[in-house]
Image: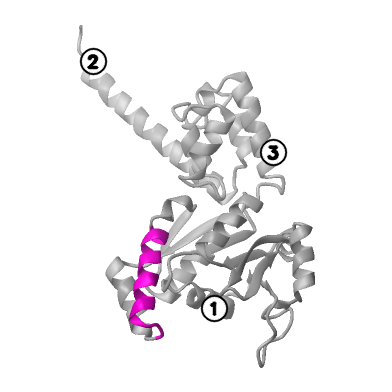
Amino acid sequence: MAEMPEVDRAAANRAAVAARRARAELKDKLRSGEITPLRALELSLDRDSAAASLRITDFLLSLPAIGAVKAPKILERLGISDRKRLGGLGRQQRVRLEEFIRERFQMGGAGPRLTVLAGPTAVGKGTVATHIRENFPGIRLSISATTRAPRPGEVDGEHYFFVDDERFDRMLARGELLEWATVHNSHRYGTPRGPVEEASERGEHVLLEIDLQGARQVRKAMPEARLVFLAPPSWDELVRRLVGRGTETEEERERRLSTAKVEMAAADEFDAVIVNDTVADAAQSIVDLMQRH
């Protein structure tokens, strides 16, 4: 078999580099919203376009709130191989993908308005959320409903929605809570769905800081929500922070660390992982993620 002439090989290499660059630019435009997912799908009908040669997995990962965890599940549901390229989709596959896009991005391609922040114990979720509230007025923090009585200085509708047990039961029965839990075998806390949806309709970004179990409940109740896992720089640093708080007994610290190990293993369930190296940097990364999509 004759070897490819040097000039042909060089031309092929240049063409391959140009194709990769074109696909990278397309993905950037999808992420920024400059090109909508439906427009990219339309462009892929041209077999010579960058869209046609874009792998379906890379296409999905370029869309708002779809990460490495969600993408395979979406492809499985749509019956599309992860090796497919947009230009190689069958007619029915293309129809199913278009229907998925229209349903998912019914708000004109805008990203999810609810971002859920979770992570292991002592990682600093509350501190980071507070920093965001105090320094980024464009981000609304979700307000929880609770059955406990207000503490001195707490304002209904600002710190919590204070409700009685009967009202909380009605909210549960009507599906008005995205998630809920009983804390310390005493009072109940939950995230009202209504304010989140109303803020979304106004185009506002909402941040919900919650535990892992609550994040899983939100994913079931509102699949379009973005889940962000706040991770420590290292396990040793997490231990140092927990011990440094000095608020728990030795037995309590051991219990929390055991729980943290299990929680750390759940990072793959999330759409994004942000390391809490410093509070300011972690907060900025979360806000950038929310505003980018």
Is there CB contact under 8 Å for labels 2 and 3? no
In the foreground, 140 or 116: 116
What percent of the width, then of the height, locates residue 195?
A: 74, 66
What is the secondary structure assignment of the residue under circle 1? helix
1 vs 3, front mark: 1
Q: Please state, as top left, top right, bottom left or bottom right, where the C terminus lies in the image.
A: bottom right
Badge 1 crowding class, 10 Å Cα cut-off, few under 14, some 14 to 19, many 20 or more, is some
Cβ atoms under marks 2 and 1 closer than 8 Å: no
Which span is picked out in magenta?
Answer: 247-264
Q: Considering only order in the chain, which callout, 1 or 2, is on the residue closer to the N terminus?
A: 2
Q: Main secondary structure of the magenta part?
A: helix
| Residue indicated by mark 3 | 102
Disc nearer the start of the sequence (1/3):
3
Which residue is depicted at the point 61% across and 26% down? 94
- What residue does disc 2 label? 4
Does the CB distance between marks 1 and 3 fall below 8 Å? no
In the foreground, 227 or 27:
227
Look at 35% across and 34% down and name the residue there: 17
Residue 278 image-quadrant placement:
bottom left
Q: Is residue 164 left or right of residue 27?
A: right
